[in-house]
Amino acid sequence: MKKVLIADDSKTFVKLLSSLLDEYLNEEFEIVSAKDGVDALFELRDGEIDILFLDIIMPIVDGHGVAKYIADRGLDLDVVIVTSTMDKENIKGLGKLGIKYFLAKPVKYEKIEAVLNKILFKNRPIPQDKLLKRKERNSTLQDGDVCIISE
């Protein structure tokens, strides 16, 4: 089974993104989370991660440190930066580390789905059931959103 890691220090954002990914990816992927960069490094070291949603500003080890770890070891995974600190220097520095996907918080559901479509289907046609499943929604995913998650 493939694995998605969400590394973000906001519990609310992790729950919201997990819920969206769970709905979008169905049972094709296991979704795990890390509350900071150190936890993310342990997950990267211990498990096969296929997609990483990574915040830049996190305690202990930040997103830059995690991205450098990935680049230094030549790990083969897709990294999506999801952060509120989207400036040219961050993008340029992370781009040099091989990161291609950047989303600014608050992020629209459609942007997440578009990135997932690029990652999952690369140069293949996207199946109709994966095309903007939330087309009718014009919402954003951000801290402070009310979220009901059934367990």
Image (cartoon, rainbow, N blue to C red):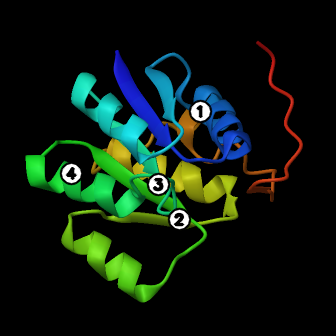
The 10 Å Cα crowd at callout 3, few under 14, some 14 to 19, many 20 or more, is: some
Q: Quadrant of the N terminus?
A: top left
Label located before the other in sequence (2 or 1)? 1
Mark in the foreground, 3 or 2: 2
Q: Quadrant of the C terminus?
A: top right
Label located before the other in sequence (1 or 4)? 1
Residue 113: x and y in percent read 56, 49
Q: Residue at x 81, y 52 (%)?
A: 137
Q: Amino acid at mark 4?
A: Tyr
Instruction: Answer left or right for 52 relative to 22.
Output: left
Residue 84: x and y in percent read 61, 69
Q: Amino acid at mark 1?
A: Tyr
The residue nearer to you, when weighing 36 against 137, is 36
Residue 69's tag is 4
Q: In the figure, 27 relative to 13: above or below?
A: above
Label located before the other in sequence (2 or 4)? 4
Q: Which residue is mark 2?
A: 103
Residues under numbered marks 3 and 2 in contact, where contact means CB atoms less than 8 Å apart: yes
Tag 2, which secondary structure?
Answer: strand
Residue 24's tag is 1
Cα separation between marks 3 and 2: 9 Å
Mark in the foreground, 2 or 1: 2
